[in-house]
Amino acid sequence: MKTIPALEKALAGSLLGLAVGDALGLASEGMSPMRIAKMFPDLSQYHFIGRKGMCSDDTEHACMTVQAWLACGGKVDGHLMQSFASILGWKLRFWLLALPAGVGLATGRAIFKLWLGWPPHRAGIVSAGNGAAMRAPVLGVLCGKDTNALRQFVAASTLLTHRDPRALDGAWVVAQAAYLSATLPRITPAETLPLLLSILGSEDSEVARQVAAAAESVMRGESTAQFAASIGCAKGVTGYVMHTVPVAIHCWLSHPEAIDAALPSVIACGGDTDTVAAIVGGIVGARCGVEGIPAHWKSGLIEWPRTVDWMVRLARRAAQAQANHHYQPLALNIPGVLVRNVVFFVIVMLHGFRRLLPPYGFKR
């Protein structure tokens, strides 16, 4: 059997892990843990179209980030970093024109500013949402060997949509976690926490305190749901980055090798389930690779034109570009995106009507 290069395995695993996490969590987005347990007792299955799944903006943004990295040549200097931000900015502009069914408030306002002429580094909204963190796992895998390069790519990606320093800190932690997941010989809370804190550079920042609390909770044997409740997310993990990222880190450290255990565990916490599960999938997938993702999750993902095969080929192209310095984005069927978005919107609306019916998530 042909040996798969380490970077290709990690990037394909991260991208596809993010996609299946997104798709698994999509049907329960915005629900409380209690209602999720009643409506979807088996969280190891998709529930979007029967037992099939589709992806949302989390996966689309991750794919656009890799494409922008390829288009700018994957290098760090002033001009190319501006090129990366500009290319990703245009991809976000046209992504919005394709009428996606779900757009985060901060991301939508930032893209509107981009259309009005704001430069990429000033378009972001003062928001501590998790929109930038969902683009970070793939950057961590691609650029983690060069801390300076990674910092610049994460900053450029974040500032497009979010200018709150906490959004940048959260995205930085997620990117580093994905890199450590792909490269460390083993992942344990006791050994991994010092590495994360040393990368952050300060143990007094809000994100450092939350990451430390997550690791310590894992060492005490607490579940991810128990940790989420302890930081005020008993009714669901919010899109606030200082809720999303610590819960994602907790879930990763609890299940560093087992994506099939990690994703149901974090989705059961409720709230912004698609984004939090996407981040967890991007981190854990970087370690387990495509082979470590359950076969029924891969076959049950009915995305098009960003198919499973397309995402694997995108990862392969980015990995090969690191070796041969031939940077070229992967072609995507743009008219197909428009058709797909119409179908996706109809299904989302049907899910919205379904939520008006029982079972409800409250005690009688």
Image (cartoon, rainbow, N blue to C red):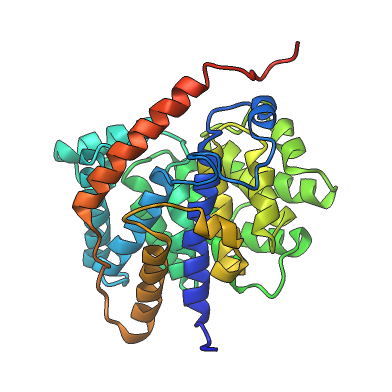
Residue located 26% across and 49% down the image:
337
**28 vs 304: above or below:** above
Residue located 52% across and 16% down the image:
356
In the drawing, does residue 188 fall left or right of residue 33?
Answer: right
Residue located 38% across and 59% down the image:
307
Q: Position of residue 326 (x, y in %)?
A: 27, 81
Indicate the quadrant where residue 138 lies: bottom left
Q: What count of labels does the image hold?
A: 0
In the drawing, does residue 83 fall left or right of residue 35?
Answer: left
Residue most toward the front? 50
Along the line of sight, the residue nearer the viewer: 285 or 362 = 362
Q: Position of residue 193 (x, y in %)?
A: 70, 58
**39 vs 292: above or below:** above
Q: Visible in this render: residue 166?
A: yes
Along the line of sight, the residue nearer the viewer: 295 or 180 = 295
**219 vs 195: above or below:** above
Residue most toward the right? 220
Q: Position of residue 45 (x, y in %)?
A: 61, 46
**Position of the N terminus by quadrant:** bottom right
**Position of the C terminus by quadrant:** top right
Q: Position of residue 40 (x, y in %)?
A: 64, 34
Q: Visible in this render: residue 211?
A: no
**32 vs 305: above or below:** above
Residue located 44% across and 69% down the image:
142
In the drawing, does residue 200 fall left or right of residue 82?
Answer: right
